[in-house]
Image (cartoon, helix red, strand yellow):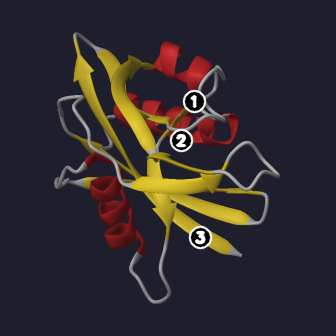
Amino acid sequence: MKISSGILPFKVENGEIKVFLGHMGGPFWKNKKRSWSIFKGEVEKGEDLLDAAKREFKEETSKEIEGEFIPLGSVERSGKRVYVWAVNRDLDTDISSNLIKIKWPPKSNKTVEFPEMDRAKWFNLKEAKEILSLYLLPFLDRLERLVKEGSF
């Protein structure tokens, strides 16, 4: 089973929880509604899960991330388990992501290169729940519960 891990920055403004999400780059996600994601990626063999999450965050944003990391658990999808940590951190939305290459259109011999994440934005939870990849939604619910309980 593949394992990924990621970081979900959040902040509370005027009693409202906001989360920092990335828009997945490339032609496949260009016009899809649920094209936003948590900054995450595959864990390398022997790599610590949180260290991998921090590495992936830097690769996808060009930003170092530190703070008190709050484990939000994991979800499983299509033979992959994803672990996420939240961190209360205010960040600007200027990102510079690593580039990836794919064949596009599918089944062609043409290769295109694009940023893995092409932009970042802050969303309140209601907005985030409408645009985040469906399988990642449990992380928003877990974050909301922990913030409301004051558990962070």
Q: Please tell me which of labels 3 and 1 falls first in the chain.
A: 3
Say above or below: 144 vs 146: above
Q: Please tell me which of labels 3 and 2 falls first in the chain.
A: 3
Q: Which residue is mark 1?
A: 132
Residue type at the position of mark 1: Leu
The N terminus: image quadrant: bottom right
Mark nearest the camera among 3 and 2 is: 3
The quadrant in which residue 2 appears is bottom right
The quadrant in which residue 96 appears is top left
The residue under the point 32% across, 71% down is: 51
Q: Seen in the image, is 92 located left or right of residue 77?
A: left
Q: Seen in the image, is 27 located left or right of residue 140?
A: right
Which of the labelled discs sits on residue 139, or is there none? 2
- Compare residues 119 and 135 and report the one nearer the observer: 119
Residue 120 visible within the image: yes
Residue that protrudes farthest toward the right in the picture: 107
In the structure shown, which secondary structural element does the residue marked by tag 3 occupy? strand
Q: Which residue is mark 3?
A: 3
Instruction: Residue 65 in the image: state x and y as whole percent.
Output: 20, 53
- Whole-angstrom CA distance, mark 3 to mark 2, is 16 Å
